[in-house]
Image (tube, helix red, strand yellow):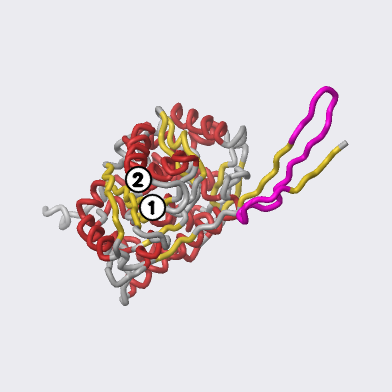
Amino acid sequence: MTRTKSLSRRADRVADRVHDEATEGGAVWRVSALKEVSYDVMVQPRLLDPANPALARAVTSGAAPVRRLVVIDATVASLYSERLTAYLAGHDVEFRLCVIDAHESVKVMATVFEVVDAMDAFGVPRRHAPVVAMGGGVLTDIVGLAASLYRRATPYIRIPTTLIGMIDAGIGSKTGVNFREHKNRLGAYHPSSLTLIDPGFLSTLDSRHLRNGLAEILKIALIKDAELFDLLATHGADLVEQRMQPGEDAVGGTALTVLRRAVQGMLEELQPNLWEDHLQRLVDFGHSFSPTIEMTALPELLHGEAVCVDMALSSVLAHHRGLLTTAELDRVLDVMRVLRLPVLHPVCTPELLRGALADTVKHRDGRQHLPLPRGIGDAVFVDDVTQHEVEAALFALGERERATRQPKVRGPVDMGV
């Protein structure tokens, strides 16, 4: 005998059922529930301008007085805390700053607990007082994980201040921290209710961190957006020089186009598979070998730099399989060099890459699911890459690097003779 009883739930739950089936000597219940998830990603220039109401609307909920905890990266605080303080005070928001020196080496549970301590001391309630996370991808990942744990789910708002945060870490559902030598081994799916992107923050970002973000934009370009790739090839160096600032000139117009296309492309891939139920993910391009490369090279490589090394290796693999022509591979590596991104690192040994791929296979539930570019702007998944192929690609990439570093032969006039 089977009895099905529909239960009343809140409006954010649909198709909830409990099945009660009698068995010999007992019973079995199966609980099935779906929760609708929605969040907004908004580009909001001049976010800290007192005349811009976007942030005030995001942090206020109609209840008075309004109290908010703001978790902010230490470097960002040194640059923007006065403007942030003036803005919040001007909009009658009572707040407390929790300043975190957020970088990859402290992306661990101890820092998550530091944020949880601040949330508990401030008295963050459970549902209607979102914590504000303001900083790069490391900071928003840490705060997101803390928010997922505190009272089992506390809302938060992300204000990414780095390019990689704006187009990658700050717009998806994943949060996480490193555990031992493993990248993002501990985490949860807990998207923020809102992400506010202000390109103005990039004006104070150093060139290396801009290039770090451009590596993730290059990822999107290579796997699904040939026009975006062309924009990077043509304007990449100027975008770094002008700090990705929107403007009326050609580079300024390109900056906003590149930002929008990168966010759009990433969200198109994330939305249908937000909880990663399917482990074939195009956005995993550049993330098969890079977690191990990044953690082994730490602190020498930033995340996007390690991803670029992975993309270079994977592109050579694709070339050896006939998926990229020689001309296309040359273009890919040339754009990486235009952006002054690394394509190889000394930690990349055959042994390390063997372990990296083995760890990725575990992460992808026993399959490689390795995305490789097919031409520029498309990709395929492969499941049969061998260690011999990896070593051949590593050798070929090394040979290309050595060739580019060879000094050019100069004539007598150039030599000053």
Is the residue marked by circle 2 packed among few (<14), some (14-19), or many (20+) residues within 10 Å?
Answer: many
The reply to whether residue 334 is in sight is no
* Secondary structure state at the residue bearing disc 2: helix
Of residue 130 and residue 246, the one placed in the foreground of this image is 130
**Can I make out residue 185 in this image?**
yes
- Picture coordinates of residue 8 (x, y %)? 69, 50
Magenta includes 19? yes
Q: Main secondary structure of the magenta part?
A: strand
In the image, residue 289 above or below residue 204: above
Image coordinates of residue 339 in percent, x first then y, are: 34, 55
Where residue 78 appears, as percent x and y from the top left, is 20, 51
Q: Which residue is mark 2?
A: 139
The type of residue carrying mark 1 is Gly
Mark 1 — residue? 165
Examine the rendered structure and indicate whether residue 119 appears above or below residue 50.
above
Quarter of image, res 370? top right
Query: Residue, x 42% and y 51% (percent of image)?
Result: 156
Q: Which residues lie in the magenta part?
A: 7-29
Q: Quadrant of the N terminus?
A: top right
Is the C-beta separation of discs 2 and 1 under 8 Å? yes
Amino acid type shown at disc 2: Leu
